[in-house]
Image (cartoon, grey):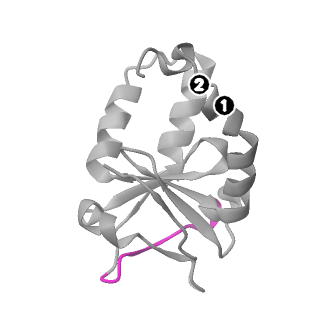
Amino acid sequence: MFLGTYTPKLDDKFRLTVPAKFRDQLAGGVMVTKGQDHSLDIYPRAVFAERAERLAQASRSNPSARAFIRNFAGSADEQHPDSQGRITIAPAHRQYAGLTKECVVLGSVDHLELWDAEAWNSYSDEHEDDFSQAVDEALQGLL
């Protein structure tokens, strides 16, 4: 499980050091893809494959489903952490997420989210009420 908030920096070669506590879980490789809200999602390969298989069941006649699948699969980039636990963030991904040197990595249960620090702070401030007022409808009876 991926939990917690971390504040690594991108180095001069646009490498992100994965938080040490997650390196064993990600040692077999990761898939970096566009996330929602202009963040990036970092999945263990097996979790990404499971999600892709479920997405393949979606109706391709639904424009929203097609758009989601295209972004999820089309922007995927396979990475293998180096001996120091670093992965390289591709130029298109950096542009999509507006990444600068200062980043935030969030545990999102089955994957990690990568945000530009300033964007995360703005998003977090703007959506505090959404968290505070989460209703059963939004979480489909999960709480």
Of residues 100 and 119, the one nearer the viewer is: 119
Farthest residue, direction front:
132
Q: In which image quadrant can residue 12 be found?
A: bottom right
Q: Point out which mark residue 5 bears.
A: none
Q: Point out which mark residue 134 bears.
A: 2
How packed is label 2: few (under 14 Cα within 10 Å), some, or many (20 or more)? few
At 56% across and 26% down in the image, what residue appears?
A: 66
At 32% across and 64% down in the image, what residue appears?
A: 22
In magenta, the rendered stretch is: 83-92
CB atoms at circles 1 and 2 under 8 Å apart?
yes
Tag 1, which secondary structure? helix
Asked whether, in this view, residue 53 is left or right of residue 103, the answer is left
> x%, y% of residue 135?
57, 18
Q: Is residue 90 magenta?
A: yes
**Residue identified by numbered label 1:** 130
Query: Up-down: is 99 above or below 44?
Result: below
Tag 2, which secondary structure? loop
At 47% across and 51% down in the image, what residue appears?
A: 76
Asked whether, in this view, residue 100 is left or right of residue 86, the answer is right
